[in-house]
Image (cartoon, rainbow, N blue to C red):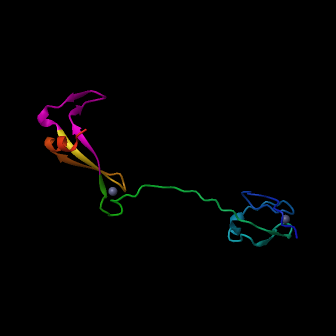
Amino acid sequence: MDNKIEHEYTAEIVCPHCGYKYGDSWEYNNDDGNKIECECCDKKFILSVNFSVDYSTSKIDCEEEKKEHTYIFSHFYHKERKYGKGLDYIILPEEEQKFYKIYICEICDNNKYDEITKEEYLKENKI
Ligand SMILES: [Zn+2]
Ligand SMILES: [Zn+2]
């Protein structure tokens, strides 16, 4: 018996005897390793079904899954500028400047801004 593969990795099943190309190969997806009788020449051949796998990923959305965010500390932020159009900005007067401790959800990357005082900012954000 000759098990030599005659047609490798073709998109459709091709009979190794007569070269007949199937148009409905997907119907044989469960016949991996089985003997198939050619629809054209009636001779038998062994079919190998090769599946390919690919992967897609997406972030988990806590809100969609109705789960609490898992916040971890990210960085401090000193809001001292007010941006106009483009790259123009003005430096805010001291009493309008704000300080934040920023957390990021390690699951979905959602941000949380906790306002803190300037004293807290200076104490915690020593460089
Ligand atoms: Zn055939
Ligand atoms: Zn989250």
Left/right placement of residue 7 relative to residue 57 reads right
Q: Is residue 41 magenta?
A: no
> Please, which residue is most extreme toward the left here?
95
Percent x, y of residue 40: 84, 66
Q: Nearer the viewer, residue 21 or 58?
A: 58
Q: Which residues are magenta?
A: 73-97
Left/right placement of residue 11 relative to residue 65 reads right
Question: Where 19 falls versus 87 (above or below)?
Answer: below
Q: Name the image quarter holding the N terminus.
A: bottom right
Percent x, y of residue 7: 80, 58
Q: Is residue 80 magenta?
A: yes
Q: Name the image quarter holding the C terminus.
A: top left
Left/right placement of residue 106 relative to residue 78 reads right
Q: Nearer the viewer, residue 48 or 122?
A: 122
Q: Nearer the viewer, residue 106 or 38?
A: 106
Percent x, y of residue 48: 74, 66
- Quarter of the image for residue 66 reads bottom left
Tally the numbered discs. 0
Residue sitting at 21 percent across and 28 percent down? 90
Question: Where 103 falls versus 22 (above or below)?
Answer: above
